[in-house]
Image: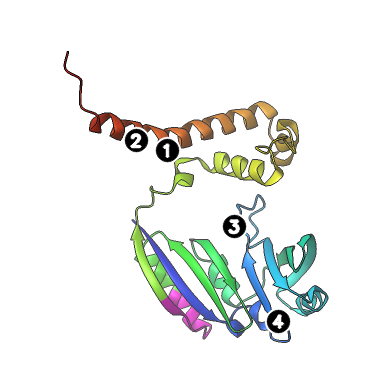
Amino acid sequence: MGIVAEITVPGDAFELGASLAPIEDVYVTFERVIPTGGRLFPYVWVSTDDHTLFCQLLQRNPAVEELEMVHREDERALYDVSWRDDTDGFLSCLRTTDLVVLRAGGTASSWEFELRFADQETVSAFQKKCADRDISISVDRVTTKSVSDPLEEKLTKSQRRTVQLALEEGYFDVPRKTTLVELAAELDVSDQAVSARIRRATKKLSQQLLLPRQSEEHEQTPLKQR
């Protein structure tokens, strides 16, 4: 069984939140992706009317190594952020614990995280790391879920990585924005391997979504008498 915890962290306890105080109206959410290079929170969405100030503040943040705006939609922009590995705050607690960040977002005053842990022992280890750094955590909700329930966990690591990249690059869009060859180059595998991963992942997800429903409908339909 897995444990999902929804927690709130004070804004100044999180490396990014500490930089947002000078901005009156700003909200940041982390893009949920599976980074191919193992980076933590590589993309963040920022909603503010002063992106110039946001960039200046982040560039002064000692936890940020590099920052680049990659997309903008009016007051909302997507940034590519590289965090320093030697930070010893809340980011370090997340990075050094065996957990999955399901959701994260916040402002200068507070941050909300939804985290999934494998077991209670991992939860306790995470809490101890935060306590050792004097980071106050407010636990808003805790639920227990079967680790095998999420559809994404029906896939292998390589299949999840391939499908995630295909989604990000627009392989499933109409018309397609990328090709198997381009995905293969990004993943450093053959295009045949990419095609096989996508087909197998599609089959697994289709079976998970459709076959149980078909079985249920079949069981609920009475047999016709001849």
* Residue 84 visible, this angle: no
Q: Which residues are magenta?
A: 127-139
Who comes first in sequence, dot 2 or dot 4?
A: 4
Mark 2 or 3 closer to N-term?
3
Residue position marked by numbered label 1 in the rendering: 209
Crowding at dot 2, Cα within 10 Å, few <14 / some 14-19 / many 20+, comes out as few
Residues at circles 3 and 1 in contact by the CB criterion of under 8 Å:
no
Give the Cα distance between marks 3 and 4.
22 Å
- Residue 133, magenta (yes or no): yes
| Structural distance between the alpha carbons of marks 3 and 1 | 22 Å
* Sequence-earlier tag: 3 or 1: 3
Residue 83 shown left or right of residue 56 in the figure = left
Choose mark 2 or mark 3, whichever is in front: 2
Identify the element where label 2 is drawn.
Answer: helix
User: Would you name the residue on which mark 2 appears?
Assistant: 212
Locate residue 163 relative to residue 73 in the image: left or right: left
Discs 3, 4 touching: Cβ within 8 Å:
no
Residue appearing at x 70%, y 69% in the figure = 46
Horizontal placement of 208 versus 108: left or right?
left
Real-space Cα distance between discs 2 and 1? 7 Å
For disc 1, the neighbor class at 10 Å (few under 14, some 14 to 19, many from 20) is few
> Residue 186's x, y, as percent?
73, 41
Instruction: Tell whether label 1 touches label 2 (CB within 8 Å).
Output: yes
* Position of 112 relative to 68 (above/below): below
Q: Nearer the viewer, mark 2 or mark 4?
A: 2
- Residue type for callout 4: Ser
Between disc 3 and disc 4, whose residue precedes? 4
- Where residue 192 sits: x, y (%)? 65, 26
